[in-house]
Amino acid sequence: MNNFIYNIPTKVYFGENQLGNLGKEVSSFGKRVLLVYGGGSIKKSGLYKRVIQELMRVGEEIYELSGVDPNPRIESVRTGAKICQDRMIDVVLAVGGGSVIDCSKFIAAATFYDGDAWDLSSKDVEITKCLPIVTILTLSATGSEMDDCGVISNLKTHDKIGRHHKLMQPKVSFLDPTLTYTVNAYQTACGAADILSHIFEVYFNLNKDIEMLDGFMEAMMKTVIKFAPIAIAEPTNYEARANLMWASSWAINGFIVGGKKQAWSCHPMEHQLSAVYDITHGLGLAILTPRWMRYYLNNKTLDKFCQFAINVFDVNKDLPKMEIALKGIDRLEDFLFGSLNLTKRLSVLGIDDSHFKEMAKKAATPNAFQPMTAADVENIYRLCL
Ligand code: NZQ
Ligand code: ZN
């Protein structure tokens, strides 16, 4: 068991009708705010208007960066950082899903960096200062609202790179489940797959750690498996949206990690898929995960897969171990491709093996749950075709 530090410094306003606190929180950081949002969902839903009213109520000077793409691009970061520098912005307000929040994190850091913003992820240069970030979450998936990570794409170089830094952690996040009522079935499903994957990346670990955390993770997985189909069938079901939202934040805010030290497996493979083919992150994870599980089901990992099958999917514990493990993976597939109705194969998305070699080299991860060489990654990609 390793030692660890527990520190989650994001203040969360959870629930309906909390936006009345937005002005107070934003203005505590200063008078000039950069409002960052995506392709227009917040205008359609009426959220944009509410945010502007609240910011004007406290006399904020508002600047805007709109049009942040899913799989946010480095170009948006450069534009946003320039606005922050030119307008002497005090605080960045991200209103959207993970893409908008991630982009805002890099904008906040790039504002104080003299070189090209892409260095912040590609060269891991030091981040010494960051603007404070406030978020209003509109999609339950990435957990970016409560973690210190951001992921940025450079479509020109076929790269999508994540970076962690404590200074990029949002100071305040508004988590109102009603703001996710307008998320469509597909994005809800992709979000659920992403939340599950964040838990899997930590749960599938062979080193001994605090057992309590496994129990939390299993409960969180069951929460997603129970409520995602409800949210899809009844988009305005508050209980379902609320459970997904809080699960998304806690899946990746650091709590479940404890002292486990292990690199992630499916995320590096998926980030390469998004970098080259610009696919939805959660969909890529849904396609990859069961194949990754089958590929690494062996004598060493068998007990962990049995634990997963029995505790998450209630598979009969009296069956032979290998059967238990395989049934657990089957049940996960039923959930992802049946209940969530996600596409099962990369080929359906028009993806073939032409970039697999180059992608596999970038996604190889020796210190993952099971060491993943480039050859392994390429094999797993092929299983997904
Ligand atoms: O752009 P708008 O118009 O807002 O539409 C978005 C977008 O088209 C839409 N949407 C969001 N909220 C909505 C809504 N539509 C209707 N009603 C609402 N309330 O949904 C689409 C997808 O949004 P996006 O922000 O891209 O989705 P998500 O939250 O899944 O974020 C994905 C990005 O986060 C990264 C992913 O790689 C990907 O780039 N990740 C970030 C992580 C982190 N910061 O810790 C970890 C994750 O593993 C992940 O890598
Ligand atoms: Zn993810």
Image (tube, grey):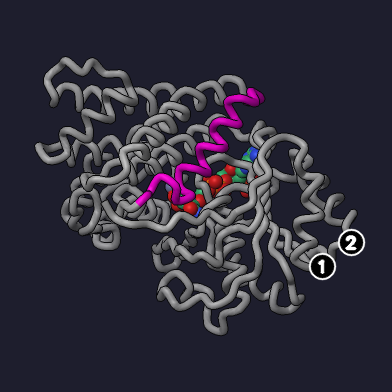
Residues at marks 1 and 2, CA–CA distance in whole angstroms:
7 Å
Amino acid under disc 2: Gly
Q: Is residue 88 left or right of residue 319?
A: right
Q: Is residue 326 left or right of residue 220?
A: left
Q: Residue at x 42, y 73 (%)?
A: 124
Is disc 2 placed on a helix, strand or loop?
Answer: loop
Q: Which residues are magenta?
A: 235-258
Q: Is residue 359 or residue 226 the one in the foreground? A: 226
Q: Are marks 1 and 2 in contact (CB under 8 Å)?
A: yes
At label 2, counting other C-alpha atoms closer than 10 Å, the crowd grade (few under 14, some 14-19, many 20 or more) is: few
Q: Is residue 278 visible?
A: no
Q: Main secondary structure of the magenta part?
A: helix
Q: Tag 2 or tag 1, which sits nearer the N-term?
A: 1
- On residue 31, which mark appears? 1
In the picture, residue 246 is in which quadrant? top right
Q: Residue at x 21, y 28 (%)?
A: 306
Quarter occupied by the C terminus: top left
Q: Is residue 208 or residue 219 the one in the foreground? A: 208
Is disc 1 placed on a helix, strand or loop?
Answer: loop
Q: Is residue 270 or residue 321 the one in the foreground? A: 321
